[in-house]
Image (tube, rainbow, N blue to C red):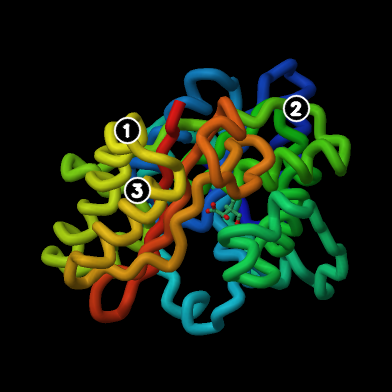
Amino acid sequence: MNIIHTQENLAAAVAAAKAGGKIVGLVPTMGALHEGHASLIERCADECDLTVVSIFVNPTQFNDPNDLRNYPRTLDADCHLVESKGGDIVFAPDVAEIYPEPDQRHFSYPSIDTVMEGARRPGHFNGVCQIVSKLFLMVNPDRAYFGEKDFQQIAVIRAMMADQDFHFTLVSCPIVREESGLALSSRNTLLTEEERCVAANINRVLQESKLYRQTHTLVETREYVTDTLNRIEGLEVEYYEIVDAFTLTPLTDWKESKHIQGCITVYCGARPVRLIDNVSYQ
Ligand code: PAF
């Protein structure tokens, strides 16, 4: 496996692969890799001839400087994991390599990027689109892999791809969970053992709500999830929205859409750690 730090070397490696007719796959990450990322890398390695994993903690998508500072950075361990899962290239640039000048581009996809995370983290999705579009231009992959835990991020990236004329395949991959049901996230390493157990209630209640919805209205179901989780010590729901899975428009009635997703953000523990998850009501 090759560890590359510059755009020039990345371009050369990708060009050589493409000249040999290879299918190139990209797995964009911010590092601190876990089994969720591992599943993306494995799938990419299965489906592509060259698997490029980018590891870059992108400053433009953080609206909280403390969050950026505290974000776990574990490059050596990450490289071992990429290699063990069949990755061919780790692209690990520094900030100056990606942003020699501030990125002035502005991406806007109302209402996909203005609800939920977009409303609470101003500039976050603009930063995501900045880095992801740069990576897409650098690698020009045939396929790019993203995890469904970041449900809204996938919708925003799809909108950006349509807008910017990226015509390759976005592969969205199922959430990987701990045995307790907690969705894997790099932020889970910031939880104590006890907080991890408490956080497992998020998925438990989301799963319960699928049964609850059969006999209750959408508004009642939304309240059920929020109230049940807020009653658990150590958890505080920031929002729970039930939305159309494609437009992300918040819904008030089950009849408003055939493709319905519940998206949640919960603060957990003393620090507290901000966790996201989602559930399909298909
Ligand atoms: O999901 C992430 O880890 C990041 O938002 C991404 C897509 C790698 C962009 O920095």
Measure how far apart labels 1 and 3 are at the Cα level.
37 Å
Residue that appears at 24% across and 80% down:
270
How busy is the neighbourhood of tag 2: few (under 14 within 10 Å), some, or many (20 plus)? few
Measure how far apart labels 1 and 2 are at the Cα level.
42 Å
Q: Quadrant of residue 213?
A: top left
Measure how far apart labels 3 and 2 are at the Cα level.
26 Å
User: Marks 3 and 1: in contact by CB < 8 Å?
Assistant: no
Q: Identify which residue, 54 or 151, lies in the foreground.
A: 151
Disc 1 is placed on an element classified as helix
x then y, percent, for residue 24: 66, 27
Q: Identify which residue, 117 or 215, lies in the foreground.
A: 215
Question: For mark 1, what is the residue?
Answer: 215
Left or right: 135 in relation to 235: right
Question: For mark 2, what is the residue?
Answer: 168
Question: For mark 3, what is the residue?
Answer: 34
How busy is the neighbourhood of tag 1: few (under 14 within 10 Å), some, or many (20 plus)? few
How busy is the neighbourhood of tag 3: few (under 14 within 10 Å), some, or many (20 plus)? some
Left or right: 167 in relation to 151: right
Earlier sequence position, callout 1 versus callout 2:
2
Looking at the rendered structure, the kind of residue marked 2 is Phe
Residue that appears at 26% across and 47% down:
205
Q: Is residue 14 above or below residue 160?
A: above
Looking at the rendered structure, the kind of residue marked 1 is Thr
